Amino acid sequence: MQFMRLAVFAGGSLFGLAQAQSAPPNLIPMDEPPVGLTAPATASPPIAAFQYSFGSNPVATLVTANPLLCGNTAAASGSTPVGIRPLYYSANASTAAVPPPFVFGATAAAPTVSAIAYGATNLVYDGSQVQFGGDPLDALVCYGLTTSDGVNFVHKVSRDLFDSDFEVPGTSGILGNSTVALNVIQLPTAANGNYYIYTVDVDIPPLPVGTNCNILDCNFALIEGYDTSVFDTTSGQWCVAPAGATSCVSPPPSGGTAAAFGDININYSNYGATVSLQAPIGGTQHKTVHFVAFRKLAANVSSLPASGAPVVMAALFSPLDLEENKLDDNVSTGNNTLANVAPSVATDNTFNAAVGALHENTDSGTLTFGISDPDSPESTGNLLHASVTLNLPNGIQVPVAADCGSATPITTLPVNRTCTIDIPLNNATFWDFSVATQYQGQFNNVATDNVNGTYASGVSAGVQIVATDAQGKNGAPVSTLVHIFSTKNDAPVVTTDANQLPPDSNNNNYPTWTCSIGTTNSCGTFALRYLISLTAASTVVPGPVAAFDELAAQTTAVVNYTGSDANGGNVQCTLENGSIFTTNGNPIVYPSDGSTTNYDLSFQLTNPPTYGSALCTATMTDAESGGFPNGETAATVQSTFRIVVNP
């Protein structure tokens, strides 16, 4: 590590930099906005704005004018990585002789001490500013909060600083937009024991299929903290709870945790003891985690600060490896105002089982789920409602109308509604307004499973439900896997290479190969005995573009013609006039080298070529390893083309 002008402070194991009479020094943390270092003016004894402890576990304590939040998404590199412990004293505390700080990620054993984030490098002080960067593994992530009014602290986008002018913030990374939302659901009063309750909701989108998290850092970290000048440090607890829950219960429900003392501090090192925040890989489902936290007013505090300044904060740290650029929604705060709590969706086992066993070309029937909102009474035209999206392969998103009951407003809390949807998989045109032209008219061909309950390779689907309350606030998306069993086997689809076999407008637009005897080498050459070979003359796929299961699980083949055709070969050819083929060297269709969908065509003309034409038909079939599902059988399709030898 490099230290500039620090030697004068290094006489012991700890040195401190008190605020000078002139402007305080600036802190430049990694790529975050600069923030002033400031010592609380009334503190007695004084608190240094910058403290550094040497030894085997060096730690830099930074007293910042605005909150600085730091966390680890992976283990920091090096044998003795430097720790960063930011300290922030709110306006509520900074005038006290012994000011209590905001604490973040504190343990139950040390509830007044913020967690340390490790991995700072190049920690430098040059007399006017302190600066540090992150370790080479990018394990250390810091967010510097800014404010324009001293109350509304936010984290702005900062990773786009070096993007080109052509990049749109939040779109150039490999990860979509992860978010954290802190919602205050109870303000403290004497009647409720002076408890302040809030929820923290994390949403992490999936990474692309095939992402290797042994190479990339896919781990997120979450810290939460509160103003200890407002809240007691020994009474508050938190838990993981089902979506929409507003309390911690014992014993905890499936997926939940028992209430714990201290602050929320979840990272790579404690996933086994709490909940994993590693990004999901592939599929359509986001990872969503719902926390409930409650804090009690300190003994000497009777009410929340009237200023509206934050008293609780939560930060979701996005790994630098994932290049998420939209970070302005990765920090959330709570103050003296109740949030409009997001509504929630409740899908039960019946709903989940039903969407997990749909059938191709069959109406789903009525599917039912519940939605709820705890704090927004309805009014005429402003109802609790839900939007439903069917997510299919190839990025296809199809809206499905949800009926959530009567238009009569519900004015008592909580607001609960039962919603129904119908997915008409037998309606071929249902999705036409949502898909590209090649998919239109094919909704009845959609299937995902070549074995019931098991997706075909590379295929997945899901249904996502978002509840919206009477005030227009959206809840966290709830996603459920969708399986659509195959029930009908569609015929293969054949396309012909129009460059080699252009359509003949004078003859039913049949794909037509043409040569002219009078044009040198037009019909082949003598050395090759007038043998014509057309590479990849046609493409044959196992089904239409909407048959996702068939395209992923099936292959195609030629059905050899076994009738009495004097022309020979495996294609039925009927001479329209003349005799253009040599004996036993006639049209044959066969797979192109290394391809399972492209087919070559070859045939041999008479020597020398003679005038005439033939109309030929190839029969193609599909096949599936292990047999077709649900009693289906192979399907065939015929492809007709012409061969013309002109004078």
Image: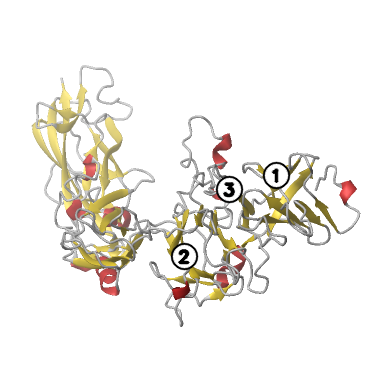
Q: Amino acid at mark 1?
A: Leu
Task: Answer whether residue 491 is visible to the viewer in this image.
Answer: no
Other-residue count near label 1 (Cα within 10 Å), few / some / many at <14 / 14–19 / ≥20: many
Comes first in the chain, label 1 or label 3 = 1
Residue 540 to residue 96: above or below: above
**Percent position (x, y) of residue 105?**
61, 64
Comes first in the chain, label 2 or label 3 = 3
- 111 on left or right of 249: right
**Percent position (x, y) of residue 558?**
24, 49
Numbered circle sitting on residue 27:
1
**Percent position (x, y) of residue 509?**
13, 31
Task: Answer whether residue 625 is visible to the viewer in this image.
Answer: yes
Q: Amino acid at mark 2?
A: Tyr
Q: Secondary structure at mark 1?
A: strand
Mark 2 = which residue? 198
Mark 3 = which residue? 145
**Percent position (x, y) of residue 193?**
49, 75
Q: Secondary structure at mark 2?
A: strand
